[in-house]
Amino acid sequence: MIQVNQLNFGYGSKQILHGVSFEAQKKQVISLIGPNGSGKSTLLRCLSGLLPTTGAAVLLEGKPINQCSNRQIAQKIAFLPQFQERLTALSVYELVAMGRSPYYRSGWFSTPEDREKIDWAMAYMGVETFRNRLVNQLSGGERQRVWIAMILAQDTPFILLDEPVTYMDLKHQWGLLDTILSLKEDCGKTVISVFHDINHAIEVSDLVYMMKEGKIYNHGSCDQIITEKSIHDVFEIPAKVCRFHPLQKSIVVPEGCRKCGRGLHKH
């Protein structure tokens, strides 16, 4: 379990998070949604231990995360940031293999178990066919799939994703959403992800945390949290939450650009 208790965080004099409380149980998909600058990525970095927290503000399986070593955290939490490093001379296999580094005992010596998990992660993300290609020779969407394979090879109970569908075309966006659901259902993982597209969050989430100005505006199930009022209050745009019975789910439809005359008429 990951627990957050009244977390405050800032950069210098600029306060980003204000009294945030959060909880992630085993085998859940939890989405963080909200406008740019609402604190979603900062919260994710605090959960991952990359940003310093004080006291018991963030607990990892009951222990303050600031009392855990980097190796201990990396064996429990895998984190994929929104922007990755540019790699010039690393193959796909070598990058995915880096996901096993928290388990290496001496240097970069890999075990049969390591190699099995690396091969599984590449197959799971469909990147095994270009295992020997250089990462910098791949398209943006292909690179994103390779980075995700790396964190799957890490094989942690918690996976943190910051806008994971960035650079992906429509087909691979929805393929990744299927992967997220499979990681929960088939592998028992807990996935905490930032999404810009609210409909992506609706597709996969057990719980949604909606953020505004560094605070939790509300949290709960999609039906409870994603409403026309909450979208207007948090994102400051009019939108319709439509339910299509053949799909058995809700879809958020912004009312459109009124300046262009494409807005929906209110009744």
Image: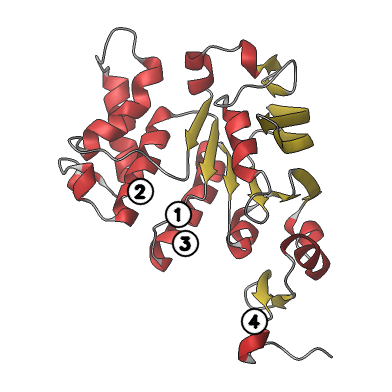
Using the numbered discs, state the Cα–Cα distance from disc 4 to disc 3 in whole angstroms.
23 Å
Identify the residue position indicated by label 1 in the image.
176
Give amino acid for label 1. Leu
Q: In the picture shown, does residue 187 fall above or below 54?
A: below
Disc 2 residue type (three-letter)? Arg
Image quadrant in which you'd find residue 171: bottom left
**Residue shown at the point (31%, 23%) measured from the top left:** 114
Q: Secondary structure at mark 3?
A: helix
Label whose residue precedes the other's in the sequence (4 or 1): 1
The reply to whether residue 75 is in sight is: no
Left or right of residue 17, residue 51 in this image? left
C-alpha span from label 2 to label 1: 9 Å
**Residue to which mark 2 is pinned:** 145
The residue wearing badge 4 is 256
For residue 86, say whether it is visible.
yes
Residue that numbered label 3 is attached to: 174
